[in-house]
Image (spheres, rainbow, N blue to C red):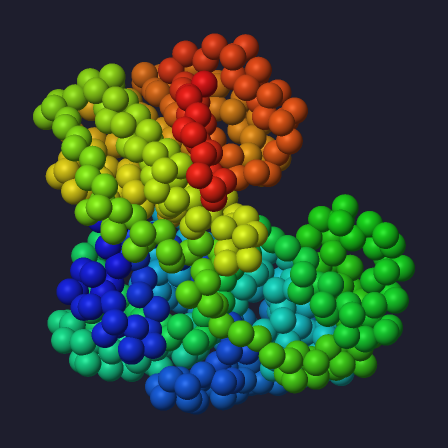
Amino acid sequence: MVLSFADYFGISIENFDATGAFDPVLSVDTRLFIDPSLLRKTTTPELAQSYERVSTHFGDVLRVIAAVQKFGDVFWRTADKSLTFPEVNGLCIGYAKDSTGGSGMGPKLRAQLLGTMHEIVSAGVNDPALFELVGAFEKNIGPDRISDMIARIIIKDLIAFTQRVCSDCGVPMEALPVVKGEPKEDMPKSPVTGNAVILVPKDVLRDLPEAEEYGDIYWIAQQNDEVRDEMNRIVGDSWSKASTTDLKHALRRTLIQHPEGLRDVLKAYMEGHRDPYDFLEDRSGEVAWYRASRELVSKEPLPLKLAAKPTLDEVESVVLAICRHFKKLLEDNQLCKLLYDKGGRRKHESAAQLLFFGVASAYCRANDLALSPESDGGRGPVDFKVSSGFQGQVLVEIKLTSNPQLVHGFEKQLPIYKDAESAQRGIYLVIDNGGASDARLDNFKQKVIAAEAEGLRVIYVDGNPRPSASKADF
């Protein structure tokens, strides 16, 4: 089921937008996170005290950490318990790949974080905002984990916000568990998971990076001369070549050695300004795909039929029809405009993956097909499955020509389709977004021709936002 919260409960988008809540798609994780710095200026009444709650919680943790004498002592255990956050399910945001649940922090990661914080506190810095920046210098901790920690701390505020929105919009609620081990709360029930749905105000959300980046690391290094000089001494001119893990390790060591520099960084952070995600521009392609795909189905119907017990060939023919119609929508109906932001800059490949996922899901639903596209949160290869009477798989993988892994992605798929135990079919959907030279495209085409891949089709789509003749499949 690919439906947003508002659509499932029959709320007009205008009325739901007026609540200030983000309208999550119930079966797909949206790559957004709660930015603690945005809690400082939220206008949502239920979250008016949220930042104070976060600051108080982390301040208490730091005071306990300051008393730690050795690993595992009573103060260590107390601090560890304060950083043990049960996963908050139902937020529908983050990096989750197989659910709309949260990202927990296990004992090993907590021990790693406690060790770092103990070193920093021992160096004389005990600002609670440290936890808001920890993702920039701590391995395996990023904005999604920070977001989940914040959500757990302010969960009562998020519950109150959800309850108010539901009451205002006439959404039915029932007693459901929200946090493991705590009393049930009156909350809306997800038709997908059967669990509570937790709504989040849009003004505290930002978009997650597609992969680990070192933008925050670089920003921190520029806030203090000593920190910048030490990082440049360690990294030299190899910033672009160093791994994120190496950069985090270098920054962590530098900040511990230069506590005054760390204080300058924290001061700049608290005085800085961050904006919430612009849902209208949707630069990351996180939300526009959903409405666009639903509207297109009504304007551009695509009749599809599938037998009760279809063969692999029959399933493939339906998936091919969807892919070719998607190609038409991008090339002739200017759907490709959603692959670029308002400045004409290319969005990440996940914008195209989500758009195809939405279109495919909408056409399957419109035709009442048992065929259902499933994927890792709507990204990566889309695996079309039939509820019964079908063995094997038909996969669709989408690649933009701007992706340097275009050829590698194609060659990587070949053994999957050739060596699988069940008869598999694959479609490699290549969208030209102007990100490759003619020579590179020609090289790719030659690879496709030379491969003669049995069971694997390649479909080429012109995704440039201008009128153009449809190009034939390879």
Q: Is residue 457 above or below residue 241?
A: above
- Residue depicted at x 81% and y 75%: 224
- Say whether residue 246 is left or right of residue 366: right
Residue 313's x, y, as percent?
25, 17
Q: In this rendered view, identify the residue nearer to me: 333 or 427.
A: 333
Q: Is residue 423 above or below residue 211?
A: above
Residue 167's x, y, as percent?
18, 80
- Residue depicted at x 30% and y 33%: 325
Q: In this rendered view, identify the residue nearer to me: 256 or 437.
A: 437
Quadrant of the rendered image containing residue 125 = bottom right
Residue 347's x, y, as percent?
52, 50
Q: Is residue 149 above or below residue 357?
A: below
**Residue 71 visible in the shown view:** no
- Say whether residue 189 is left or right of residue 292: left
- Say whether residue 171 is left or right of residue 351: left
- Say whether residue 167 is left or right of residue 81: left
- Residue depicted at x 41% and y 79%: 154
- Residue depicted at x 38% and y 15%: 455
Quadrant of the rendered image containing residue 428 = top left
Q: In this rendered view, identify the residue nearer to me: 340 or 421.
A: 340
Q: Quadrant of the C terminus?
A: top left
Residue 471's x, y, as percent?
44, 25
